[in-house]
């Protein structure tokens, strides 16, 4: 048997949607894949076996640490890759990972690697929601095991504990899809249940408040969020890669609870003192000022956050310190708020530059796209289309752009309708192209024809006339905006057709 240098370990339950990407990634990086199933009812197990993984069953006990530790005991490799089923590494980072394992192989003091982790929302065009650091590679040591029923952490309990280190590996990014919109609330409800049950059995643990604050924030209980986040900031033990999270949750909860500006500012000052290099708290202070309508203060705080973020990125490249920041996910909104203020004040050149910075960070942040269109709305259609195509794929992103396009840009709308290969009637084409007489003639003839077909259908006793009316009256297809328009058309036509229904005559 060939030597097993790297084992990839994962626990799963009903992960058929995410697991294929994990398997493809680990096949390239690991010599073996250990998959521990905790009760799947879909085809998760079949997928894992078909990919060549060693699959084990484990009775779920509402304890993530216990399940993951079982997986570690099955691994035969010298190094362990510990990515969850909803996490992956992109191929361009594979060489850096392999090189790190090679470089530190003869450094017994280095027992693991902390990687850059980005949470993305697959329901919103893979929008980056937050980022931080997380331990995802370690040596296969019996003295290195997980602790904690939820948000489990690897802890070394062997000899020379004080001399063992986790090395920062900033060149490798782990992409996490598990906080996508359709998943996150269900996870928060599950984690809260497990945390509260474990606290009832065993009492409070050092990191409980930080994790409870996260759960309550996701579930919209901001009073509980503020309470637990405040407690978490006062505890000596902090989760690696999540050190600033408690302060951020505390500030956001106070803002959403509409607490006085002085109270929010006091917490921001505490956070700034504890983590002076992190830009996030300036952003949150700016959001609070925006909420209160103090746009001058909001602008000052948000501009300062951009300056600090640039310094933060530079510092991170030159430092081995692990400090988390969610600025990457916040940046599109920061750009939008600053651009909006600049636009209000007549500084449209500055506003356009800020909006485009936001689009470069995340082109699917719709508020920036709308503001860009407003700022460029007076330009010729060809100029607007050329500008949009700098940020968007004209075919793949047409469906995203169409609902955002204002009525003042009909030719731009026609262009993207054609790119999307959407069905466009001759009348609508004339209308969007500005050919008013031709559009009027075509649309009048089309409406008359469809109405006659519907009347004939009713006269023949057919109760369903929608098939005779075409796509414009289909209330089940297209974007929500398109469906709403179809519903209005359908309601109007129903009223008209009701008046036209032939009256049944009784023969004498």
Image (spheres, rainbow, N blue to C red):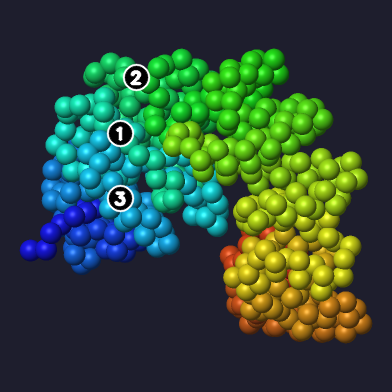
User: Which residue occupies 78% across, 80% down?
Assistant: 429
Rendering coords of residue 473 (x, y %):
67, 70
Rendering coords of residue 284 (x, y %):
64, 30
Q: Nearer the viewer, residue 307 or 420?
A: 307
Vertical relation: 21 (above or below) 231? below
Kindly indicate the quadrant of the structure image that contains residue 375: bottom right
Q: Classify mark 1: residues with Cα within 10 Å, few (<14), some (14-19) or many (20+).
A: some
Q: CA distance from mark 1 to mark 3?
A: 15 Å
* Mark 1 lies on residue: 165
Q: CA distance from mark 3 to mark 2?
A: 35 Å
Q: Nearer the viewer, residue 430 or 103?
A: 103
Vertical relation: 90 (above or below) 324? below
Mark 2 vs mark 1: give the one in front. Answer: 1
Helix, strand or loop under label 3: helix
Q: Which image quarter is the C terminus in?
A: bottom right
Rendering coords of residue 119 (x, y %):
47, 46
* Mark 2 lies on residue: 206
Mark 1 vs mark 3: give the one in front. Answer: 3
- Asked if one can make out residue 9 in the rendered structure from this viewpoint, the answer is no
User: Which residue occupies 38% across, 55% down?
Assistant: 96
Q: Specify which label sits upstream in the sequence, 2 or 1.
A: 1
* Mark 3 lies on residue: 103
Q: Nearer the viewer, residue 322 or 367?
A: 322
CB atoms of marks 2 and 1 within 8 Å: no
């Amino acid at each position: 048997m060939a030597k097993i240098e790297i084992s990839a370990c994962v626990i799963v339950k009903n992960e058929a949607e995410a697991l294929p990407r994990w398997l493809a990634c680990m096949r390239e990086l690991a010599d073996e894949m250990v998959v521990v199933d905790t009760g799947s009812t879909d085809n998760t197990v079949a997928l894992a076996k078909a990919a060549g993984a060693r699959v084990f069953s484990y009775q779920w006990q509402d304890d993530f640490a216990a399940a993951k530790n079982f997986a570690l005991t099955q691994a035969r490799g010298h190094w362990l890759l510990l990515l969850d089923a909803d996490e992956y590494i992109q191929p361009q980072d594979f060489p850096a990972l392999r090189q790190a394992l090679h470089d530190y192989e003869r450094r017994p003091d280095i027992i693991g690697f902390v990687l850059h982790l980005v949470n993305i929302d697959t329901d919103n065009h893979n929008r980056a929601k937050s980022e931080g650091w997380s331990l995802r590679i370690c040596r296969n040591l019996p003295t290195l095991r997980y602790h904690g029923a939820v948000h489990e952490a690897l802890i070394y309990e062997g000899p020379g504990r004080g001399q063992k280190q986790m090395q920062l590996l900033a060149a490798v990014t782990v992409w996490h899809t598990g906080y996508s919109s359709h998943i996150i609330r269900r996870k928060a409800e599950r984690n809260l249940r497990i945390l509260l049950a474990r606290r009832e059995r065993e009492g409070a643990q050092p990191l409980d408040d930080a994790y409870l604050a996260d759960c309550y924030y996701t579930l919209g209980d901001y009073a509980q969020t503020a309470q637990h986040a405040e407690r978490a900031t006062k505890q000596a033990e902090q989760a690696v890669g999540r050190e600033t999270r408690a302060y951020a949750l505390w500030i956001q909860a106070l803002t959403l609870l509409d607490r006085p500006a002085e109270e929010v500012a006091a917490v921001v000052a505490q956070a700034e003192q504890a983590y002076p290099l992190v830009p996030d708290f300036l952003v949150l202070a700016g959001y609070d000022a925006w909420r209160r309508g103090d746009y001058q203060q909001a602008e000052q705080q948000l501009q300062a956050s951009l300056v600090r973020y640039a310094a933060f990125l530079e510092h991170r490249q030159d430092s081995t310190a692990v400090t988390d920041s969610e600025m990457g996910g916040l940046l599109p909104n920061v750009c939008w708020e600053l651009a909006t203020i600049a636009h209000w004040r007549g500084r449209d050149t500055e506003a356009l530059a800020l909006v485009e910075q936001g689009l470069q960070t995340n082109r699917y942040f719709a508020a920036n796209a709308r503001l860009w269109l407003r700022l460029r709305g007076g330009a010729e259609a060809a100029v607007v289309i050329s500008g949009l195509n700098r940020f968007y794929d004209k075919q793949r992103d047409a469906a995203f752009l169409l609902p955002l396009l204002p009525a003042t840009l009909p030719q731009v709308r026609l262009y993207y309708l054609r790119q999307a290969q959407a069905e466009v009637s001759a009348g609508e084409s004339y209308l969007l192209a500005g050919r008013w007489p031709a559009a009027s003639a075509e649309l009048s003839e089309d409406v008359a024809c469809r109405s006659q077909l519907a009347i004939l259908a009713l006269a023949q006793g057919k109760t369903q006339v929608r098939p005779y009316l075409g796509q414009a009256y289909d209330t089940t297809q297209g974007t929500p905006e398109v469906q709403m328009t179809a519903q209005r058309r359908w309601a109007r036509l129903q009223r008209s057709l009701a008046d036209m229904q032939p009256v049944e005559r009784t023969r004498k």
